[in-house]
Structure formats: C-alpha cells, structure tokens
Image: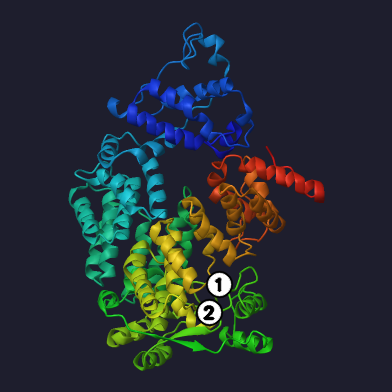
Amino acid sequence: MSPEHQDDMGMDILRLIEDAVGVILEYEDFGILRKWLLGHIRGYIPLDSPFSQMPAAEIEMMACGLLRDIWNVVPLPGKGFLPSPIPKPKRNEPCLCGSGKKFKQCCARLPEMPPLPSEVVWSFVIEQLDDLQVAEVVRNKKVSLDLIAVLIEKYLEEGDPEEAIVLLEPLFFPSIMDSSELAGLLLDGLCDAYGAMADHEGKEALLEHVIATASKSPLRSAAHQRSAAAALDQGDTAAAWLHFKAGMQDAPGSVGLSILEAQILLFEKRFSEAADRARFWIAKLKKNRRYDYGPLVERLQEVVDDPEGATATLLGAAILPDLFPELMETVQERPLPQYEYRAIEPIDADSEEGLKAEILSRLPAKLPDGVDGEAMVTKLLAEMQGGAPDQNDEAAEDDFTLVPSGTISAAETRWRDIFPLEKPFSIQWLPFECGEVWSPERTPEWTAFLRENPEALDSLDILDDFATAILALPGGMDQEEEKTLLVPILRRARRIVMESLPSNVVLDWRSVPNRPAIRPAARLALLKLDRGQEDAEFYALVEESLRINPNDNFGLRGYFMNHLVRMGRNWEALEMLARYPDDTQADIPYGSVLVLYRMGDKSRAADQFQLAFEQLPKVAKALVQSSMKQPEMNPHGIQIGGSDQAWLYQETMRDEWRKTRGILTWMKRLMQANAKRTGVWVRPRS
C-alpha cells in the first residue's frame, strides 16, 4: 500500500495491517479479529488526524470497512497457508461488524477499498512465522521468489543475516526447488548471509550441494562462479579456472562471468589478455537491448583503459594477504599494553594564524576536484578553537593524552615510513586518496611489517591506520570483512583505551594525537548504526564515546538522547540538556520538552519549548502535522534548521510524541500563542 494511500486514510494503516496479521495468525478466528479491531483502532489514529474527532460509531464503521479486506487476504496456517475469504454480505443479511443491523443499513454505505497487495500482506506474515512455518511456506511455493528476493535484500541491508538464512535455506535443502536465474541471485544472497555470519563451512557446503545436485542451469552456473571467487580468494587460480569454465558451460550468457574472468586474469598479471576479454564482454553486453548493463560496462572499461590500475578495484578480497588470519589471531589474543595518560599544554585557541598554519600542514598539496579547501580550513579551525559551531565544548582544567611505551613509539616511527595512507581529515572515514594502500607494490610491505613486528598491534596509532585500510578495501568492505577484520581491530583499540584511561579523564579531539584513541568507540557505534543495529551494545558504545569525548565530534549524542527518552530515563535525559544546553541537533532540545511534559512539569516544558522553537521552528511544525512529505536530502549533511532536519526528527521520534497524551495539542496552543506575539507562525497542515 502506497504512503499516499496511508495519508489519505488518516491513520497508520501499515502498522494496523501488521498487527492485524499477528492476531489472525495467532487465533485464526474472524470474531476475535473483529473484537480486537473495534477495541484498538483508535490507537492507529494520530491525535492530530481529523478522524480523531469522529464519533465512536463512525470510527467503528470505518474499522469494519477494513475488517473483511484484511481477513480475506491473510493466509491461515490451519488452512495450509491459504486464505479463508468471507464473501460480501447481501443487502438484507446481517452486517459483519456485529451491529445487528442489515448490511444495507450499516457498512454497505462505506466506499469500496482497493485490494491489499499480496506482497504487503506476505511480508508481514513471513516476519511473524517461526522457522518451521517459514520453511513450509517456502517449500510449498506459497510465496514468490520475487518477494523472497525483496525480503532478503531488506534483511541483509538491516544486518539481519539469520533471517535471510531461515528464509533461503528451504529453497536449496534438502532438495533444490528452482534453478532459474533468479534462484542464482538468491544463492548469492544466501552466500552473503553465511559470509556475514562468518559461516564458511555453511557456504562451502551449500555450493558443493548445488554443484552436485542441480542440473545444467543458471543456478549451477552461479554456484560455480561463487566457487571460482572463493578459490581466487585462496590464490588457487587452477581451481578458479575449472569453476569458471564449468559456469560458462552451464550458462554461457551469465553476465557475472565477465567480471570473474577479468579478476582471474588480473590476479595472474595477464594484463593484456584481461583488457582483450573485457573488450569482448563490453561488446556483448552492449548488444543486449533488454537490460541496462551500464555499471558493469564501466567496470570492464576500467580494465580496458588501465588493467594494472583496475587490479585493486576488481580483485577486492582476493588481494587480501594470506597472513591476515594470523594477524587477526594476534589482534584478538595478544595481551593489552598499558598506556600512560599525561597532562598536555592546552591548545592556544587565540592564535588563529598559528592554527591555520597547522591545518594547512595537514592537508594534501592538491585537493580532489569538488573539495572546498577554504571550507575545510574553517571547519577544522572551529574544531581546534573549541568544537564545531553547533557543539558545546566542556572546558576541562587540564588537557590529557595517552602516551605509549618507547617500544611502541619506535614501531610507530618505522610504520610512518612505509604505510601509504594519510590520516582521514577531521571525522571523515577515509583520506582523500586511498589507491596505493592496496596496490600490489605497497600492500606486501606494510602487511609484512605487521606480521614481523607484533608490537605494532599494541599501537593505537597503527591500529587506527589498519582500520582505515580495511575501510578502504577496493570495491568496498562487505559484511564478512567488517566482522572478521575491521571489528576485531576496533575492539582491541577500544579495550586499550578503556584499560588505560581513568573514568574521570577525557580526551580533547582538537589534539590530533588523541584521535586514534577517540575513533574506535565512535567507529564501532557508527558501524552498528549503518547496519540498523540500534541495540544495547550500540547505546553502550555511544555512551562510552560521549564519556571519552564529551564534545561529541561524531554527532552521536542525539541517538543517545532519543534512547534515554524511549527508555523513560528522564533524569539522565535532562542531564544531556545540561551538558548541551544550546545544541542545534533537534534531539536534545525537543527531547527535553517531551521529558519535562511527561514528568508533569509543564512550566519548565513550556520554557524549554520556547527555546527549542526559537532555534528550530520547523521541527515543531513537523511534529504537529498529520504527515510530512520527505524533502530533498543533501548527501553531504543535514541543514541545521532546515526541512530535512525536521523531517528526520519526526520520522525518528514521532511515535514517542504521539503516544504522550495531550502533548501535541498543548504544543499547538503554545505555537498559536507565539504566533499572536510574533506573527510568524504557520498553521500546520491537517
């Protein structure tokens, strides 16, 4: 069901359908569904919706208009996952709503609803079944492969590979249900899910099973292609070629073979042949008028133009050195070093010329196209003079830094001579130029240094660089590389910091040597956020990051404030307001309004609302609207006070505000009173 239809209904219709599906699956009883819907429908009508003022009888009639529409499309477990539709009553038959009236005198007057799309219903059904039931509906082909593909993409993007495995395994075990090209794509999805779980045995068993039992088909070709890539990751080009040729025989037109062939040739340094074969594949792909292979053609064109330069981009995990398992074992098992914390001379924030010179010395001589050097200097200058303009800087009596032992310092000196990456600018994840770090010429040198000098993995500075290198993997870091490489590095660095830094000592981000100690907790938190994993560990990482770096240069405080509000930890939320009283992120000023109102202190809530509204008026207007269209989002950041900031906050916290009875009406009155004084209030859309 489209968002527009949801707005027209004046209620949270998708949440209602999801919850109704749960009731149907649990009880499989139309009467229970009717009783539940009549008793709960008001909970799905926002307080600012025009329907919230409707008489109870009309709301019940509206509920009954939805009743049969939902029931008739939900598959019932007791019926072999088939619906049990109830026909529309005849004019003189009793109405289904239970009013006792004839249908023609009751719900017949309601307008006809468009049918609920089966994809919407099944997506809710799948997520509420247990593992055995999921296997049953997949094995019995109750759900389409297209819908499974959509759900798998969603699960993997949200960092939930376990759900993807539960949904996909019945397609391939104990027997193969489908051998189409789409099944081949789902095989890739299952391999990715196993990879995210670091279940290498499961992935290997899957590929062996498909190759051994599937007939000649696109599916078996996909299994051979994944096996070829796995062999290449191990440096076994003979096995990679065997699987490539088998995949070619099973599905000669499979477009995945194009990149795979280029990867094997590049790995063997057969650059001229790689360029020739890339030209062949480009010509073949361009003849296909049915699909747009533009991105794939672009990657192959890189091989034609510069085969040696394309090596790092295309090979990805295949260029990871064999010594990485050994390094990861050292990362996880080596005892932690002890750092000293020492007071350092505070940064002189008054010497602007000196600070500018310091900034310019850190920037590359030539910046990439599109990078505004003047804006970068302004940003970093603000940080070094006391934090970005929108952040509160808690001044400390002393500035501190963590100091390593002499052995570690000596390793760091040698490391700087061979490691080819600069530090990221400010809070960026990567430096401007990352190409050399994974080049065939430079990678062996710095990875060999790590293997031969295990004390290097005691250095926060070197661990920081190692993590940055993993983030800069050619073609991007996949979930398996994140879990097995990046996360262990960051966790070791985080443990070193926590073991060495007393709880009452903070680190100043403006002091550049402190940044390798500040980054690990923040990076771990941001990784979980990127995977949609706002769980207990995420909030513990955010809290830790804010303790180490109260100035919060990574912008995590808003997530923590929203967590405190949702958990009802009111006094801790108000402590956040005390720490960041002039914050221009919406979460703290508006979250404090919500907390104070819930605590019954409407006087202080009104004072805080006035401050928040004066600073960020669009947020308040977004909260009291029944709906808000998503504005155009800037990929480079949020505009403070802009519609994008307002939309994001109301999307994140709307449910918390709407379940707090009376607050939106109270806030509207305050806005109206403010309008009378200033004449600048704009009435929200109803």
Look at the numbered disc 1 and give the secondary structure of its residue: loop
Residue 199: horizontal and vertical position, in percent?
A: 25, 59
Q: Residue at x 34, y 59 (%)?
A: 257
* 2 and 1 marks in contact (CB < 8 Å): yes
**Residue 24 appears in which quarter of the rendering?**
top left
Q: Would residue 404 be found to the left or right of residue 394 on screen?
A: left
Q: Residue at x 52, y 34 (%)?
A: 44
Residue 164: horizontal and vertical position, in percent?
A: 33, 49
| Residue 574, disc | none
Q: Would residue 293 be found to the left or right of residue 8 on screen?
A: left
Residue placed most toward the observer, 309 or 598 = 598
**Does any portion of residue 124 appear in the rendered image?**
yes
Look at the numbered disc 2 and give the secondary structure of its residue: loop
Label 1: few (<14), some (14–19) or many (≥20) C-alpha neighbours in 10 Å: many
| Residue that protrudes farthest toward the top in the picture | 92
**Residue 308 appears in which quarter of the rendering?**
bottom left
Residue 326: horizontal and vertical position, in percent?
A: 25, 77
**Residue type of the residue flagged with mark 2:** Asp
**Does any portion of residue 144 appear in the rendered image?**
no
Q: Earlier in the sequence, mark 2 or mark 1?
A: 2
Answer above or below: position of 441 versus 569: below
| Residue 508, disc | 2
Answer above or below: position of 159 versus 81: below
**Residue type of the residue flagged with mark 1:** Asn
Q: Which residue is drawn at 69% across and 43% down?
A: 668
**Residue 483 appears in which quarter of the rendering?**
bottom left
Label 2: few (<14), some (14–19) or many (≥20) C-alpha neighbours in 10 Å: many
* The C terminus - image quarter: top right
Which residue is tagged 1? 551
